[in-house]
Amino acid sequence: MDFLQGQSIETTVAVAVAVVAIAAGGAFLLRSRKPKGCLDPENFKKFKLFEKKQISHNVARFKFALPTPTSALGLPIGQHISCRGQDATGEEVIKPYTPTTLDSDLGYFELVIKMYPQGRMSHHFRKMKVGDYLSVKGPKGRFKYHVGQVRAFGMLAGGSGITPMFQVARAILENPNDNTKVHLVYANVTYEDILLKDELDNMAKTYPGRFKIYYVLNKPPENWNGGVGFVSKEMIQSHCPAPAEDIQILRCGPPPMNKAMAAHLDELSYTKEMQFQF
């Protein structure tokens, strides 16, 4: 009888250990499993605006709710979404935008939008109120990133072209397993035109060995210590990694800037493989 009781106790302990192991394994899988994305590459889906904050006279931050507080947008690093709206005449307009949030930001996604006086989609965003819905489709884009892809990125951004650069830089810097260095040259007309400046300066302060930023202004204020005029070959040489097989230069800005930067990079011996334009 004592033998049977001992065997029963051993069986009970074994079952308990197995249950704990299964529970722990299940919890690990739940923690490590990525939330399912909310985007559809073929069909527009609607997301509710729950916060709109004016940053300057023509720039606002829009936050859109995802289906649940634990939902992720499902946007690969460096890719964008297509947003659909109506212009001032009521005509449909579709334009690409890059969220400033990552899939680690659960429950919502954020767009920082510069609204131009004659911009067709700008009109739609200008008229949006909390409670309105935005039609979104994605992911879109050719850029693909994985840890260790390059030793360093050089980034040449102009105006609202900062958003894909910001998204990529954030993803790299916030990943403790990613040692990629980021060198950003960011050009604008005036100081007031600089988007996400607080966030960029905070990144430079938080990751001084991995993130460098150089601002360039066409019309700088007094006592400005950044670059002046347009981004030059000399600025690229001074503030971006030199041509090498393990680096890449990303560029995103107005068409004239993109064309000028491509010419500069070619002249500085950056091969086509070392360049990417959003």
Image (cartoon, helix red, strand yellow):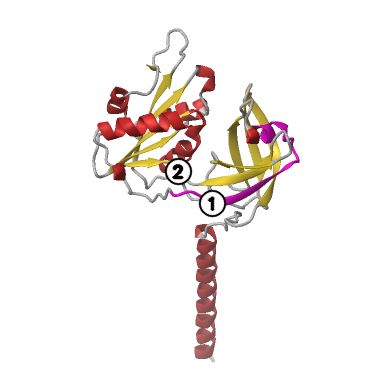
Give residue 58's position: percent from left, percent from top: 62, 24
Q: In the image as oriented, which residue stretches furthest toward the top? A: 222
- The quadrant of the image that shows the N terminus is bottom right
Residue receiving disc 2: 171
Up the image or down, 211 lies above or below 149; here it is above
Residue 136 among those drawn in magenta: yes
Q: What element carries label 2?
A: helix
Foreground residue among 256 and 165:
256
Residue at 48% over, 33% down: 161
Foreground residue among 109 and 261:
261
Q: How far apart are marks 1 and 2 (CA)?
A: 17 Å
Up the image or down, 249 lies above or below 82; here it is above
Quadrant hosting residue 256: top left
Cβ atoms under marks 1 and 2 closer than 8 Å = no
- Tell me the magenta residue range: 123-142
Residue at 28% over, 23% down: 234
Give residue 274's position: percent from left, percent from top: 30, 42
Q: What residue type is labelled 1?
A: Pro
